[in-house]
Image (cartoon, rainbow, N blue to C red):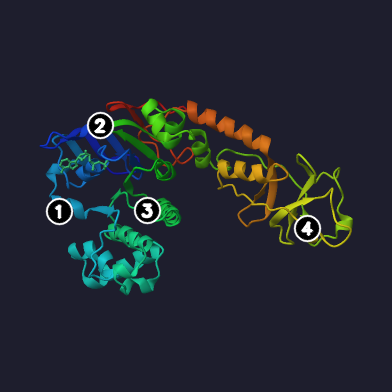
Amino acid sequence: MQSGKGLRMISFEAVSKHYPNGTTAVDDLTLELPEGGLTVLVGSSGCGKTTTLRMINRMVDPSAGTVRVAGRDVRDSDAAELRRSIGYVIQQSGLFPHRTVLDNIATVPLLLGWGRRKARSRAAELLERVGLEAESGDRYPHQLSGGQQQRVGVARALAADPPVLLMDEPFGAVDPVVRTQLQDELLRLQRDLRKTVVFVTHDIDEAVRLGDRIAVFRTGGRLVQCAPPARLLTRPADDFVAGFLGAERGLKLLSLTTLGEAEVPHEPVTPVRTDEPVAEIRVGGNGGSYEGTQGNWRVAVTPDGAPVGWLDAGALPAGGTAGDAGLLPLRPLRDEDSLLAALDESVSSPARAVARVDGDGVLSGVTGQAALHERAAVHHTAAATAEPAEPGGEPGAGGGRSGQEVTGTGAVRTAEATS
Ligand code: ADP
Protein backbone atom coordinates (compact mmCIF):
# COMPACT_ATOMS: atom_id res chain seq x y z
CA MET A 1 0.00 0.00 0.00
CA GLN A 2 1.39 3.36 -1.04
CA SER A 3 0.77 6.50 0.87
CA GLY A 4 2.14 10.00 1.09
CA LYS A 5 1.54 12.95 -1.18
CA GLY A 6 2.59 12.65 -4.79
CA LEU A 7 2.57 8.86 -4.98
CA ARG A 8 0.29 7.11 -7.43
CA MET A 9 -3.06 6.82 -5.78
CA ILE A 10 -4.75 5.50 -8.92
CA SER A 11 -3.10 3.76 -11.84
CA PHE A 12 -4.30 2.31 -15.12
CA GLU A 13 -1.97 -0.25 -16.66
CA ALA A 14 -2.78 -1.08 -20.32
CA VAL A 15 -6.51 -0.95 -19.56
CA SER A 16 -9.11 -1.54 -22.26
CA LYS A 17 -12.87 -1.88 -22.17
CA HIS A 18 -14.66 -3.55 -25.07
CA TYR A 19 -18.41 -4.10 -25.11
CA PRO A 20 -20.01 -7.17 -26.69
CA ASN A 21 -21.54 -4.98 -29.44
CA GLY A 22 -18.03 -4.26 -30.69
CA THR A 23 -17.61 -0.81 -29.12
CA THR A 24 -14.19 -0.06 -27.69
CA ALA A 25 -14.97 2.41 -24.92
CA VAL A 26 -11.38 2.62 -23.59
CA ASP A 27 -8.36 1.58 -25.60
CA ASP A 28 -5.06 0.57 -23.97
CA LEU A 29 -5.01 3.25 -21.30
CA THR A 30 -1.88 3.70 -19.20
CA LEU A 31 -2.14 6.57 -16.76
CA GLU A 32 -1.04 7.36 -13.22
CA LEU A 33 -2.91 9.78 -11.01
CA PRO A 34 -0.89 11.17 -8.13
CA GLU A 35 -2.28 11.35 -4.61
CA GLY A 36 -3.77 14.68 -3.67
CA GLY A 37 -4.10 15.92 -7.25
CA LEU A 38 -7.16 16.93 -9.22
CA THR A 39 -7.02 15.24 -12.63
CA VAL A 40 -9.62 16.19 -15.22
CA LEU A 41 -10.61 13.71 -17.93
CA VAL A 42 -11.77 15.77 -20.88
CA GLY A 43 -12.95 15.02 -24.40
CA SER A 44 -16.07 15.08 -26.49
CA SER A 45 -19.05 12.84 -25.78
CA GLY A 46 -18.48 9.09 -26.16
CA CYS A 47 -14.69 9.14 -25.92
CA GLY A 48 -14.58 6.93 -22.83
CA LYS A 49 -14.31 9.35 -19.90
CA THR A 50 -17.16 7.93 -17.82
CA THR A 51 -16.08 4.36 -18.50
CA THR A 52 -12.56 5.24 -17.34
CA LEU A 53 -13.93 6.83 -14.17
CA ARG A 54 -16.21 3.89 -13.40
CA MET A 55 -13.42 1.37 -13.72
CA ILE A 56 -11.85 3.00 -10.65
CA ASN A 57 -14.73 2.03 -8.34
CA ARG A 58 -15.63 -1.15 -10.21
CA MET A 59 -18.94 0.05 -11.57
CA VAL A 60 -17.36 -1.18 -14.81
CA ASP A 61 -14.75 -3.94 -14.98
CA PRO A 62 -11.99 -3.71 -17.61
CA SER A 63 -11.75 -6.24 -20.44
CA ALA A 64 -7.97 -6.11 -20.19
CA GLY A 65 -5.29 -4.52 -18.03
CA THR A 66 -5.18 -3.57 -14.37
CA VAL A 67 -6.63 -0.69 -12.36
CA ARG A 68 -5.05 -0.05 -8.98
CA VAL A 69 -6.18 2.17 -6.12
CA ALA A 70 -3.53 2.85 -3.49
CA GLY A 71 -1.40 0.17 -5.10
CA ARG A 72 -4.05 -2.54 -4.87
CA ASP A 73 -5.66 -4.20 -7.90
CA VAL A 74 -9.33 -3.21 -7.64
CA ARG A 75 -10.34 -6.77 -8.59
CA ASP A 76 -8.95 -7.87 -5.23
CA SER A 77 -11.38 -5.58 -3.42
CA ASP A 78 -15.01 -6.28 -2.71
CA ALA A 79 -16.91 -3.98 -5.11
CA ALA A 80 -19.40 -2.68 -2.53
CA GLU A 81 -16.66 -2.04 0.00
CA LEU A 82 -14.53 -0.29 -2.60
CA ARG A 83 -17.41 2.01 -3.57
CA ARG A 84 -17.98 2.99 0.04
CA SER A 85 -14.35 4.01 0.30
CA ILE A 86 -14.49 6.20 -2.82
CA GLY A 87 -16.65 9.33 -3.06
CA TYR A 88 -18.78 9.57 -6.19
CA VAL A 89 -20.63 12.64 -7.47
CA ILE A 90 -22.79 12.67 -10.60
CA GLN A 91 -24.54 15.32 -12.67
CA GLN A 92 -28.07 15.23 -11.24
CA SER A 93 -26.73 14.85 -7.68
CA GLY A 94 -28.37 11.39 -7.39
CA LEU A 95 -29.79 12.22 -3.96
CA PHE A 96 -32.43 10.02 -2.39
CA PRO A 97 -35.64 12.06 -2.83
CA HIS A 98 -37.42 10.74 0.28
CA ARG A 99 -34.56 11.33 2.67
CA THR A 100 -33.70 14.70 4.19
CA VAL A 101 -30.52 16.44 3.19
CA LEU A 102 -28.80 15.43 6.45
CA ASP A 103 -29.85 11.80 6.04
CA ASN A 104 -28.61 11.83 2.45
CA ILE A 105 -25.19 13.08 3.55
CA ALA A 106 -25.07 10.56 6.39
CA THR A 107 -25.73 7.59 4.06
CA VAL A 108 -22.24 6.12 3.83
CA PRO A 109 -21.24 6.75 7.47
CA LEU A 110 -24.42 4.87 8.50
CA LEU A 111 -23.57 2.01 6.14
CA LEU A 112 -20.15 1.92 7.73
CA GLY A 113 -21.79 1.55 11.16
CA TRP A 114 -20.85 4.92 12.62
CA GLY A 115 -24.08 5.17 14.62
CA ARG A 116 -26.80 7.72 13.97
CA ARG A 117 -25.61 10.50 16.25
CA LYS A 118 -22.04 10.55 14.95
CA ALA A 119 -23.16 10.23 11.33
CA ARG A 120 -25.59 13.14 11.64
CA SER A 121 -23.07 15.32 13.39
CA ARG A 122 -20.57 14.63 10.60
CA ALA A 123 -23.31 15.43 8.06
CA ALA A 124 -24.03 18.77 9.75
CA GLU A 125 -20.32 19.63 9.69
CA LEU A 126 -20.13 18.86 5.96
CA LEU A 127 -23.24 20.87 5.19
CA GLU A 128 -21.45 23.93 6.51
CA ARG A 129 -18.25 22.99 4.74
CA VAL A 130 -19.91 22.99 1.32
CA GLY A 131 -21.46 26.39 2.00
CA LEU A 132 -25.04 25.47 2.93
CA GLU A 133 -27.15 26.82 5.80
CA ALA A 134 -27.72 24.48 8.73
CA GLU A 135 -31.51 24.83 8.16
CA SER A 136 -31.25 23.12 4.78
CA GLY A 137 -30.35 19.87 6.58
CA ASP A 138 -33.99 19.16 7.40
CA ARG A 139 -35.25 19.84 3.88
CA TYR A 140 -35.80 17.33 1.12
CA PRO A 141 -33.72 17.49 -2.08
CA HIS A 142 -36.59 18.87 -4.23
CA GLN A 143 -36.81 21.86 -1.88
CA LEU A 144 -33.30 22.96 -2.88
CA SER A 145 -32.01 24.63 -6.05
CA GLY A 146 -29.98 22.61 -8.55
CA GLY A 147 -26.75 24.21 -7.32
CA GLN A 148 -27.60 23.47 -3.68
CA GLN A 149 -28.38 19.86 -4.56
CA GLN A 150 -24.97 19.53 -6.17
CA ARG A 151 -23.38 20.86 -2.98
CA VAL A 152 -25.26 18.21 -1.01
CA GLY A 153 -24.00 15.63 -3.53
CA VAL A 154 -20.42 16.73 -2.84
CA ALA A 155 -21.01 16.66 0.93
CA ARG A 156 -22.44 13.15 0.69
CA ALA A 157 -19.45 11.96 -1.31
CA LEU A 158 -17.08 13.39 1.30
CA ALA A 159 -18.99 12.11 4.33
CA ALA A 160 -16.80 9.13 5.17
CA ASP A 161 -13.65 11.12 4.36
CA PRO A 162 -12.61 8.93 1.41
CA PRO A 163 -9.15 9.50 -0.04
CA VAL A 164 -10.53 9.40 -3.58
CA LEU A 165 -13.35 11.46 -5.06
CA LEU A 166 -14.81 10.66 -8.50
CA MET A 167 -16.86 13.43 -10.11
CA ASP A 168 -18.75 12.80 -13.37
CA GLU A 169 -19.86 16.08 -15.01
CA PRO A 170 -20.99 17.18 -11.54
CA PHE A 171 -21.73 20.78 -12.56
CA GLY A 172 -23.05 20.02 -16.03
CA ALA A 173 -26.70 20.75 -15.31
CA VAL A 174 -26.48 24.11 -13.53
CA ASP A 175 -26.43 27.60 -15.04
CA PRO A 176 -23.06 29.26 -15.77
CA VAL A 177 -23.04 31.58 -12.73
CA VAL A 178 -23.82 28.79 -10.25
CA ARG A 179 -21.36 26.59 -12.08
CA THR A 180 -18.56 29.09 -11.51
CA GLN A 181 -19.52 29.27 -7.82
CA LEU A 182 -19.46 25.48 -7.52
CA GLN A 183 -16.06 25.34 -9.24
CA ASP A 184 -14.69 27.96 -6.83
CA GLU A 185 -16.11 25.97 -3.93
CA LEU A 186 -14.49 22.76 -5.16
CA LEU A 187 -11.11 24.49 -5.51
CA ARG A 188 -11.46 25.89 -1.99
CA LEU A 189 -12.41 22.47 -0.56
CA GLN A 190 -9.58 20.82 -2.44
CA ARG A 191 -7.02 23.27 -1.04
CA ASP A 192 -8.05 22.10 2.43
CA LEU A 193 -8.75 18.42 1.84
CA ARG A 194 -6.25 17.40 -0.85
CA LYS A 195 -8.29 14.44 -2.02
CA THR A 196 -7.26 12.52 -5.09
CA VAL A 197 -9.98 13.84 -7.40
CA VAL A 198 -10.85 12.49 -10.84
CA PHE A 199 -13.19 14.90 -12.59
CA VAL A 200 -14.95 14.22 -15.90
CA THR A 201 -16.09 17.06 -18.15
CA HIS A 202 -16.46 17.85 -21.86
CA ASP A 203 -15.82 21.55 -21.14
CA ILE A 204 -12.19 22.54 -21.71
CA ASP A 205 -12.60 25.82 -19.81
CA GLU A 206 -13.80 23.91 -16.76
CA ALA A 207 -10.86 21.54 -17.16
CA VAL A 208 -8.34 24.38 -17.32
CA ARG A 209 -9.93 26.11 -14.35
CA LEU A 210 -9.95 23.08 -12.07
CA GLY A 211 -7.25 20.62 -13.08
CA ASP A 212 -3.76 20.11 -11.72
CA ARG A 213 -3.53 17.82 -14.71
CA ILE A 214 -5.73 17.38 -17.74
CA ALA A 215 -6.07 14.09 -19.64
CA VAL A 216 -7.40 14.67 -23.15
CA PHE A 217 -9.27 11.73 -24.73
CA ARG A 218 -10.39 11.26 -28.30
CA THR A 219 -13.01 9.05 -29.90
CA GLY A 220 -12.28 5.37 -29.58
CA GLY A 221 -11.28 5.73 -25.93
CA ARG A 222 -7.73 6.85 -26.63
CA LEU A 223 -5.77 9.09 -24.30
CA VAL A 224 -3.93 11.67 -26.38
CA GLN A 225 -2.13 13.76 -23.76
CA CYS A 226 -2.07 14.15 -20.00
CA ALA A 227 -0.26 17.20 -18.69
CA PRO A 228 -0.61 20.18 -16.35
CA PRO A 229 -2.82 22.86 -17.94
CA ALA A 230 0.02 25.32 -18.61
CA ARG A 231 1.94 22.66 -20.46
CA LEU A 232 -1.07 21.49 -22.42
CA LEU A 233 -1.77 25.07 -23.49
CA THR A 234 1.80 25.83 -24.53
CA ARG A 235 2.76 22.42 -25.88
CA PRO A 236 -0.27 20.50 -27.14
CA ALA A 237 0.87 17.06 -28.28
CA ASP A 238 -0.80 17.27 -31.68
CA ASP A 239 -3.34 19.12 -33.81
CA PHE A 240 -6.22 17.25 -32.19
CA VAL A 241 -5.32 18.56 -28.72
CA ALA A 242 -4.61 22.05 -30.12
CA GLY A 243 -8.00 22.04 -31.83
CA PHE A 244 -9.73 20.85 -28.67
CA LEU A 245 -8.09 23.59 -26.61
CA GLY A 246 -9.45 26.19 -29.04
CA ALA A 247 -8.14 29.36 -30.58
CA GLU A 248 -7.51 31.25 -27.35
CA ARG A 249 -4.76 29.15 -25.82
CA GLY A 250 -2.65 32.18 -24.96
CA LEU A 251 -5.52 33.87 -23.14
CA LYS A 252 -6.37 30.67 -21.27
CA LEU A 253 -2.79 30.51 -20.04
CA LEU A 254 -3.01 34.13 -18.87
CA SER A 255 -6.18 33.26 -16.97
CA LEU A 256 -4.23 30.59 -15.06
CA THR A 257 -1.38 32.83 -14.01
CA THR A 258 -1.67 35.26 -11.12
CA LEU A 259 0.05 38.63 -10.91
CA GLY A 260 1.92 37.31 -7.89
CA GLU A 261 3.18 34.18 -9.68
CA ALA A 262 4.26 36.19 -12.72
CA GLU A 263 6.05 38.64 -10.37
CA VAL A 264 4.43 41.61 -12.03
CA PRO A 265 6.14 44.66 -10.52
CA HIS A 266 4.32 47.43 -8.65
CA GLU A 267 5.38 50.92 -9.63
CA PRO A 268 5.14 53.38 -6.76
CA VAL A 269 2.40 55.99 -6.99
CA THR A 270 1.29 58.99 -4.97
CA PRO A 271 -2.50 58.89 -4.98
CA VAL A 272 -4.95 61.73 -4.59
CA ARG A 273 -7.38 61.49 -1.71
CA THR A 274 -11.01 62.03 -2.61
CA ASP A 275 -11.32 64.62 0.18
CA GLU A 276 -8.35 66.63 -1.13
CA PRO A 277 -9.35 70.12 -2.43
CA VAL A 278 -8.76 70.30 -6.19
CA ALA A 279 -6.87 73.56 -5.73
CA GLU A 280 -4.10 71.58 -4.00
CA ILE A 281 -3.72 68.93 -6.73
CA ARG A 282 -0.67 69.54 -8.85
CA VAL A 283 -0.48 68.53 -12.48
CA GLY A 284 2.42 66.24 -13.42
CA GLY A 285 6.02 66.68 -12.37
CA ASN A 286 5.34 65.79 -8.73
CA GLY A 287 6.45 62.20 -8.98
CA GLY A 288 2.95 61.01 -8.36
CA SER A 289 1.22 61.37 -11.68
CA TYR A 290 0.84 58.44 -13.97
CA GLU A 291 1.04 59.31 -17.67
CA GLY A 292 -1.56 57.61 -19.83
CA THR A 293 -2.12 58.04 -23.51
CA GLN A 294 -4.17 61.17 -22.93
CA GLY A 295 -4.59 63.25 -19.81
CA ASN A 296 -2.62 63.23 -16.61
CA TRP A 297 -4.08 60.33 -14.72
CA ARG A 298 -3.84 59.96 -10.96
CA VAL A 299 -5.32 57.24 -8.77
CA ALA A 300 -7.98 58.60 -6.43
CA VAL A 301 -8.22 56.83 -3.07
CA THR A 302 -10.60 57.02 -0.11
CA PRO A 303 -9.18 58.37 3.15
CA ASP A 304 -8.52 54.67 3.99
CA GLY A 305 -6.33 54.30 0.91
CA ALA A 306 -8.70 52.18 -1.20
CA PRO A 307 -8.53 53.14 -4.88
CA VAL A 308 -11.87 54.32 -6.24
CA GLY A 309 -11.19 55.81 -9.67
CA TRP A 310 -8.90 57.52 -12.14
CA LEU A 311 -8.66 61.30 -11.87
CA ASP A 312 -7.51 63.48 -14.77
CA ALA A 313 -5.31 66.03 -13.02
CA GLY A 314 -5.07 68.00 -16.26
CA ALA A 315 -8.81 68.63 -16.42
CA LEU A 316 -9.88 69.51 -12.90
CA PRO A 317 -13.01 71.49 -12.05
CA ALA A 318 -12.62 75.01 -10.60
CA GLY A 319 -13.45 74.02 -7.03
CA GLY A 320 -14.53 71.23 -4.69
CA THR A 321 -12.64 68.10 -3.80
CA ALA A 322 -11.05 65.37 -5.89
CA GLY A 323 -14.07 63.20 -5.19
CA ASP A 324 -16.26 65.73 -7.05
CA ALA A 325 -14.01 65.70 -10.13
CA GLY A 326 -15.73 63.01 -12.20
CA LEU A 327 -13.58 59.94 -11.61
CA LEU A 328 -13.38 57.25 -14.26
CA PRO A 329 -14.02 53.68 -13.07
CA LEU A 330 -11.22 51.51 -11.81
CA ARG A 331 -11.14 47.86 -10.73
CA PRO A 332 -8.35 47.31 -8.18
CA LEU A 333 -6.31 44.14 -8.62
CA ARG A 334 -4.76 41.88 -6.02
CA ASP A 335 -1.76 39.61 -6.45
CA GLU A 336 -4.21 36.67 -6.61
CA ASP A 337 -5.90 38.10 -9.70
CA SER A 338 -4.90 36.72 -13.08
CA LEU A 339 -2.76 38.32 -15.73
CA LEU A 340 -5.79 38.09 -18.00
CA ALA A 341 -7.91 40.12 -15.58
CA ALA A 342 -5.12 42.72 -15.33
CA LEU A 343 -4.73 43.03 -19.10
CA ASP A 344 -8.49 43.36 -19.43
CA GLU A 345 -8.54 46.13 -16.82
CA SER A 346 -5.61 47.95 -18.40
CA VAL A 347 -7.38 48.00 -21.78
CA SER A 348 -10.38 49.78 -20.26
CA SER A 349 -8.30 52.10 -18.05
CA PRO A 350 -7.79 55.65 -19.38
CA ALA A 351 -4.28 55.53 -17.89
CA ARG A 352 -3.47 52.22 -19.67
CA ALA A 353 -2.49 50.95 -16.25
CA VAL A 354 -3.96 48.99 -13.37
CA ALA A 355 -4.13 49.96 -9.70
CA ARG A 356 -2.82 47.25 -7.38
CA VAL A 357 -4.01 46.68 -3.83
CA ASP A 358 -2.77 44.66 -0.86
CA GLY A 359 -4.81 42.13 1.11
CA ASP A 360 -6.61 44.96 2.94
CA GLY A 361 -7.65 46.64 -0.30
CA VAL A 362 -5.17 49.52 0.17
CA LEU A 363 -3.39 50.90 -2.90
CA SER A 364 0.06 49.35 -3.19
CA GLY A 365 1.14 50.68 -6.60
CA VAL A 366 0.28 50.72 -10.27
CA THR A 367 1.39 48.61 -13.23
CA GLY A 368 1.38 49.87 -16.80
CA GLN A 369 0.21 47.88 -19.78
CA ALA A 370 3.74 47.53 -21.14
CA ALA A 371 4.93 45.83 -17.95
CA LEU A 372 1.91 43.50 -18.05
CA HIS A 373 2.68 42.54 -21.64
CA GLU A 374 6.31 41.95 -20.82
CA ARG A 375 5.51 39.68 -17.84
CA ALA A 376 2.88 37.82 -19.89
CA ALA A 377 5.41 37.11 -22.63
CA VAL A 378 8.08 36.00 -20.14
CA HIS A 379 5.63 33.73 -18.36
CA HIS A 380 4.43 32.22 -21.63
CA THR A 381 7.97 31.37 -22.65
CA ALA A 382 8.73 29.91 -19.21
CA ALA A 383 5.62 27.71 -19.33
CA ALA A 384 6.43 26.54 -22.86
CA THR A 385 10.01 25.59 -22.09
CA ALA A 386 9.63 24.19 -18.54
CA GLU A 387 10.12 20.44 -18.22
CA PRO A 388 7.31 18.67 -16.41
CA ALA A 389 7.95 18.07 -12.74
CA GLU A 390 8.84 14.64 -11.41
CA PRO A 391 5.91 12.30 -10.83
CA GLY A 392 6.42 12.72 -7.11
CA GLY A 393 6.18 16.51 -7.41
CA GLU A 394 3.60 18.06 -5.14
CA PRO A 395 0.47 18.76 -7.18
CA GLY A 396 -0.16 22.45 -7.01
CA ALA A 397 3.49 23.48 -6.79
CA GLY A 398 5.25 25.56 -9.43
CA GLY A 399 2.44 27.89 -10.35
CA GLY A 400 -0.19 25.55 -9.05
CA ARG A 401 -0.14 23.10 -11.89
CA SER A 402 2.82 20.76 -12.06
CA GLY A 403 2.98 17.07 -12.69
CA GLN A 404 4.08 14.29 -14.94
CA GLU A 405 3.23 14.17 -18.60
CA VAL A 406 1.83 11.32 -20.65
CA THR A 407 1.45 11.50 -24.41
CA GLY A 408 0.31 9.19 -27.18
CA THR A 409 -0.47 5.61 -26.37
CA GLY A 410 0.51 5.68 -22.78
CA ALA A 411 4.26 6.27 -22.85
CA VAL A 412 4.99 7.85 -19.48
CA ARG A 413 7.59 10.56 -19.72
CA THR A 414 9.42 11.21 -16.52
CA ALA A 415 11.79 14.00 -17.44
CA GLU A 416 13.93 15.55 -14.75
CA ALA A 417 12.58 18.79 -13.36
CA THR A 418 14.86 21.61 -14.33
CA SER A 419 13.53 24.24 -11.99
P1 ADP B 1 -18.00 9.65 -22.35
O1 ADP B 1 -18.10 9.58 -20.87
O2 ADP B 1 -16.70 10.16 -22.82
O3 ADP B 1 -19.15 10.36 -22.98
P2 ADP B 1 -18.50 6.80 -22.21
O4 ADP B 1 -17.40 6.27 -21.39
O5 ADP B 1 -19.82 6.99 -21.54
O6 ADP B 1 -18.06 8.16 -22.93
O7 ADP B 1 -18.74 5.85 -23.46
C1 ADP B 1 -17.69 5.47 -24.34
C2 ADP B 1 -18.26 4.62 -25.48
O8 ADP B 1 -18.70 3.38 -24.95
C3 ADP B 1 -19.44 5.26 -26.16
O9 ADP B 1 -19.37 4.97 -27.53
C4 ADP B 1 -20.61 4.57 -25.53
O10 ADP B 1 -21.71 4.54 -26.39
C5 ADP B 1 -20.06 3.18 -25.29
N1 ADP B 1 -20.71 2.48 -24.17
C6 ADP B 1 -20.79 2.90 -22.89
N2 ADP B 1 -21.43 2.00 -22.13
C7 ADP B 1 -21.79 0.97 -22.96
C8 ADP B 1 -22.47 -0.27 -22.79
N3 ADP B 1 -22.93 -0.65 -21.59
N4 ADP B 1 -22.64 -1.06 -23.88
C9 ADP B 1 -22.17 -0.68 -25.09
N5 ADP B 1 -21.50 0.46 -25.31
C10 ADP B 1 -21.33 1.29 -24.27
Residue receiving disc 4: 273
**What is the spatial separation of the Cα atoms under label 2 and label 3, in whole angstroms?**
27 Å
Label 1's element? helix
Q: x, y percentage for residue 392?
A: 36, 36
Question: What residue is shown with label 2?
Answer: 30
Nearest to viewer (mark 4 / mark 3): 4
Instruction: Specify few, some or many for label 4: CA neighbours under 10 Å numbering under 14, 14-19, or 20 or more.
Output: many
Relative height, residue 15 to residue 79 (above, below) = above
Circle 3 crowding by C-alpha within 10 Å: few under 14, some 14–19, many from 20: few
Mark 3: amino acid = Leu
Residue type of the residue flagged with mark 1? Ala
Of labels 4 and 1, earlier in sequence is 1
Residue at 16%, 53% in the rendered image: 81
Residue highlighted by disc 1: 80
What is the C-alpha distance between the residues marked 4 and 3? 43 Å
- Crowding at dot 2, Cα within 10 Å, few <14 / some 14-19 / many 20+, comes out as many
Task: Say which residue label 3 marks.
Answer: 193
- Which of the two discs, 4 and 3, labels the residue nearer the N terminus? 3
Q: Which is nearer the N-term, disc 2 or disc 1?
A: 2
Q: Give SS at disc 2.
A: strand
Spot the residue most to the left: 20
Could you say which is closer to the camera, residue 416 or residue 52?
52
Callout 4–callout 3 Cβ contact below 8 Å: no
> Which image quadrant: the N terminus?
top left
> Could you tell which of marks 1 and 3 lies nearer the N-terminus?
1
| Of the image marks 2 and 3, the number of the one nearer the N terminus | 2
What is the CA distance from the residue labelled 2 to the residue labelled 1?
25 Å
